[in-house]
Amino acid sequence: MGSFTSRLIRWQRQHGRHNLPWQGADAYCVWLSEIMLQQTQVATVIPYYQRFTASFPTIAALAAASEDEVLTHWSGLGYYARGRNLHATAQIIVEQYSGEFPHDFEQILELPGIGRSTAAAICALAYHERRAILDGNVKRVLARYCGIAGWTGNKVVEEKLWQQAEALLPQHDITSYTQALMDIGATVCTRSRPKCDECPVQAGCIACQTNRVPELPTPRSRKAVPEKHATFLLLMHGNDILLEKRPGSGIWGGLWCPPQFDDEGAARDWFVRSGMAASHGERLETFTHIFTHFKLRITPLRIQLSRKPLHAAQPGSVWLDVEESLQAAIPAPVRSLLKELNRRMG
């Protein structure tokens, strides 16, 4: 155990990452980075993190913002429940903890969107508390080092990994050790093409010694990814487009999107019932947006209206200039669509 931890800590000081913008920061910044880094690469997160902290430098500032403002800053990062949970958590911290991020592990664990590993990472990195983490990278490192087979999402396998994570914890240098685990998983013990010859703990790694690195951790059994279909109705009046706010839950919850339907027939029926008058329309090229559990085939129908209907600008919907709409809280495929529309009109 001592060899594993001491080698990792020494490696981190010499070869680890030391210039990430949230390193050495307070609990707010550590929490924000941990949430952003869930399912998202560091290189993608850094510019989002920098814009986010510039606009919301404190928990109080984040709590005081509207959900729309928060989701606008999150737009493009995906997994939007993370942004909604951040906002809700900031409001709870202002109401219950006077705007100070709580220090107690159990209190942190009760906050929306924070699980055991994230709470532990905050305690270890911000408060230097002796806590074990187990994010995706760490699961891979420990599965290989300890020779633990099985899909890491399986509860039995995950519990074995937690036991190892707890057993390997050093008594001192917990912040350096925690960062070392994250860094080694992100830069050396990668999922594909791991750099075993650069690994400081290669000598004790069971997967390496038994030539099982490529097969550990055991991948999840692949199922066919279901494909769903949607039709976006791009209702235009001049350069203005109609956007609707999505319900708070579900995909793209709380974001602004064009009216969406299951198929073209449903979209056309809705348009006819609405009583709107079209000067012309066209079907744009169908494209695919990939989610974690399914693919969404999106067919955009662009309809130029001869007049802007009053009833369309009801609560939950808004007319925006296409260029202006790119500054709104919109999901990635809608942003791509609107950029293309804006390019055509430019």
Image: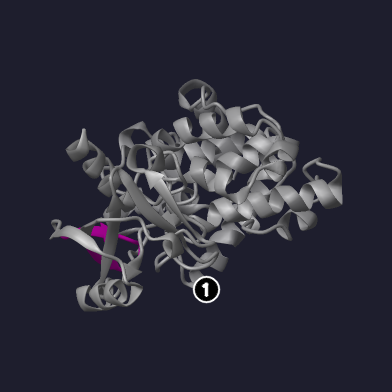
Quarter of the picture holding the C terminus: top left
Expressed as whole percent of the image width and height from the top left, the position of residue 254 reads 52, 58
Residue 175 in sight here: yes
Q: Residue at x 40, y 55 (%)?
A: 243
Expressed as whole percent of the image width and height from the top left, the position of residue 184 reads 45, 38
Indicate left or right for 134 with 226 as reference: right
Q: Residue at x 38, y 40 (%)?
A: 326
Would you place residue 269 above or below residue 259 in this image? Answer: below
Q: Residue at x 49, y 50 (%)?
A: 38
Residue 128 in sight here: no
Res 41 quadrant in image: top left
Indicate left or right for 147 with 70 as reference: left
Would you place residue 89 above or below residue 173 in this image? Answer: below
For the record, the magenta segment spans 286-299
Res 221 quadrant in image: bottom left
Expressed as whole percent of the image width and height from the top left, the position of residue 145 reads 44, 50
Q: Which residue is mark 1?
A: 156
Prevailing secondary structure of the magenta residues = strand
Would you place residue 275 above or below residue 213 in this image? Answer: below
Given residues 58 and 321, the one toward you in this image is 321
Res 219 quadrant in image: bottom left
Q: Residue at x 28, y 57 (%)?
A: 234
Quarter of the picture holding the N terminus: top right
Q: Is residue 17 magenta?
A: no
